[in-house]
Image (cartoon, rainbow, N blue to C red):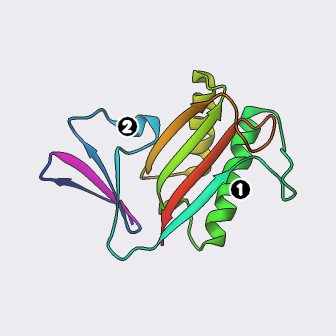
């Protein structure tokens, strides 16, 4: 269930699952970029840490050299990992995205694909980290690690 409330610090707070996401009005509106400034977890919630997922098949082989295809497969793999832990993308509180050879075009592709795949009403806290290369496998262009609540 998603709800919006204003708190005493002149912020907008949104709630999803056991998580609260806060965007202070004194900071820019990050929802246009698909994230929230602050993520908070309810007391007693179990944290689930998902290691960096990337565009691999079940044998660990890179599935594509195309960035958009890698983003799609990475999100599919993330969803598989979340499901195995008994949660979904709705339970993510924080996410870190590593992009090799970052460009504004890659950020736009990520935003387009993530919006289509996620279908989120509420955006979790998120950081994009440009890196020169990823250690997963040669040619890997994106890796996503997540923290979710249960």
Residue 140 lies, in percent from the top left, at 76, 38
**Nearest to N terminus: mark 2 or mark 1:** 2
Based on the picture, tell me whether residue 61 belongs to the magenta stretch: no
Question: Which residue is at 63% across, 57% downward?
Answer: 51
Place residue 76 in its image quadrant.
bottom right
Q: Which residue is mark 2?
A: 30
How many marks can you see? 2
For residue 81, above or below residue 8: below
In front: 66, or 56? 56
Question: Which residue is at 22% across, 39% downward?
Answer: 25
Helix, strand or loop: magenta stretch: strand
Q: Is residue 96 left or right of residue 45?
A: right
Secondary element type, mark 1? helix
Place residue 138 in its image quadrant.
top right
Residue 80 lies, in percent from the top left, at 69, 63
Residue range (magenta):
10-16
Which quadrant would the N terminus be assigned to in this image? bottom left
Secondary element type, mark 2? helix
Question: Which residue is at 64% across, 68% downward?
Answer: 83
Q: Residues within 10 Å of mark 1 (few under 14, many from 20)?
A: many
Q: Is residue 25 left or right of residue 31?
A: left
């Amino acid at each position: 269930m998603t709800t919006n409330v204003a708190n005493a610090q002149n912020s907008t707070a949104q709630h999803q699952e056991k998580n609260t996401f806060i965007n202070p009005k004194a900071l820019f509106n990050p929802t246009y970029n698909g994230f929230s400034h602050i993520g908070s977890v309810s007391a007693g919630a179990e944290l689930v840490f998902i290691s960096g997922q990337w565009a691999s098949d079940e044998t660990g082989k890179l599935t594509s050299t195309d960035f958009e295809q890698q983003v799609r497969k990475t999100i599919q793999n993330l969803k598989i990992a979340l499901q195995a832990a008994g949660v979904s993308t709705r339970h993510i509180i924080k996410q870190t995205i590593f992009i090799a050879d970052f460009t504004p075009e890659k950020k736009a592709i990520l935003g387009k694909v993530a919006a289509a795949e996620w279908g989120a009403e509420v955006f979790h806290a998120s950081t994009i980290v440009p890196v020169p290369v990823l250690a997963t496998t040669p040619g890997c262009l994106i890796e996503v690690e997540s923290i979710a609540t249960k």
